[in-house]
Amino acid sequence: MSVAETVPAPQSLDALVDLVADGDVLVLSGAGLSTDSGIPDYRGATGSLRRHTPMTYQTFTRDPRGRHRYWARSFVGWRQIAAARPNDGHRAVADLQRAGLLGGVITQNVDGLHQAAGARDVVELHGGLDRTVCLHCGDRASRAELDARLRAVNPTFGPHTEEVNPDGDVELSDDVLDGFVMVDCLACGRGPLKPDVVFFGETVPRDRVDSCFSLLEGAGALLVLGSSLTVMSGYRFVLRADKLGIPVGIVTLGPTRGDAKAGVRLDAPLGTVLPELARAVGAVASR
Ligand SMILES: [Zn+2]
């Protein structure tokens, strides 16, 4: 199936306004929504330019060296993730929610920017980078707290980096990696610690998927924002919506896997389209 066959004709904002104005819209957002916040979309149009593949669950759990490499890179990348701020797209989603037009917000992003923009009850499909989980005792802890501990034992570690993946991963040479010191779980004294995110090769917890399907079943429409729907964890909601006869809208730059199933499809920048949408449906908050 070629990309050309799956891309429908461009549609105007009007079709999107019609879709959202009826309310009960379930938002499913992806990396494209956060690119304007400086978090690169490594699976989007420029994804092939990334310098290394994302960490997999198998490598993280079975390869201590790979895990060490992840945390060293992540220690550096965290600066950029923690400094990221929500953009106009995130704010428009929060506006739509405050206006009572949304039936839920599911995000594939792990950056917390929906919540930072004021959105509530956001379901983080792939978890969140703002916390860690201990693979030994299951304790969940604050990433900011871990960062403070890591800074204390790595006072001079902080090489320059030019590229950070959405999971906070960066490039580092082996020499540099050897100088990084990782810490253990504070609760059990063991570990290892893992960011509380779903890695490639890891399944999304079943109860989380089920609650997302419940949101979808009660929705009047599914609106995909900034996701190419490459991974099944997001695409399955489009498939389910299609099966249930729930209208699907997609606003994303570039082709997506769900285009053939989308009644409304805008290939346009989210930072422009979403504020226009929020204004058009009268959802813009005064600020
Ligand atoms: Zn523990």
Image (cartoon, rainbow, N blue to C red):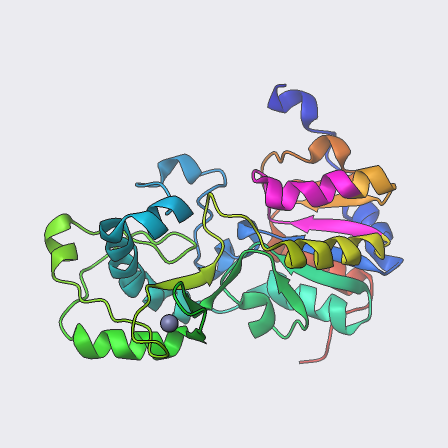
Residue depicted at 62% across the width and 36% down the height: 256
Residue depicted at 33% across the width and 73% down the height: 185
Residue 75 horizontal/vertical position (percent)? 28, 65
Residue in the foreground of this view, choosing between 222 and 210: 210
Residue depicted at 48% across the width and 41% down the height: 43
Q: Is residue 128 above or below residue 264?
A: below
Residue in the foreground of this view, choosing between 214 and 15: 214
Residue 10 horizontal/vertical position (percent)? 72, 35
Residue 106 horizontal/vertical position (percent)? 66, 58
Quadrant of the image for the C terminus?
bottom right
Apparent side of residue 216 relative to residue 147 in the rendered image (left or right): right
Residue in the foreground of this view, choosing between 4 and 61: 61
Query: Can residue 265 be seen at all in this image of the molecule?
Result: no
Q: Quadrant of residue 22?
A: bottom right
Apparent side of residue 219 relative to residue 139 in the rendered image (left or right): right
Q: Which residues are magenta?
A: 221-240
Query: Can residue 272 be seen at all in this image of the molecule?
Result: yes
Residue depicted at 17% across the width and 63% down the height: 180
- Which quarter of the frame holds ligand 1? bottom left
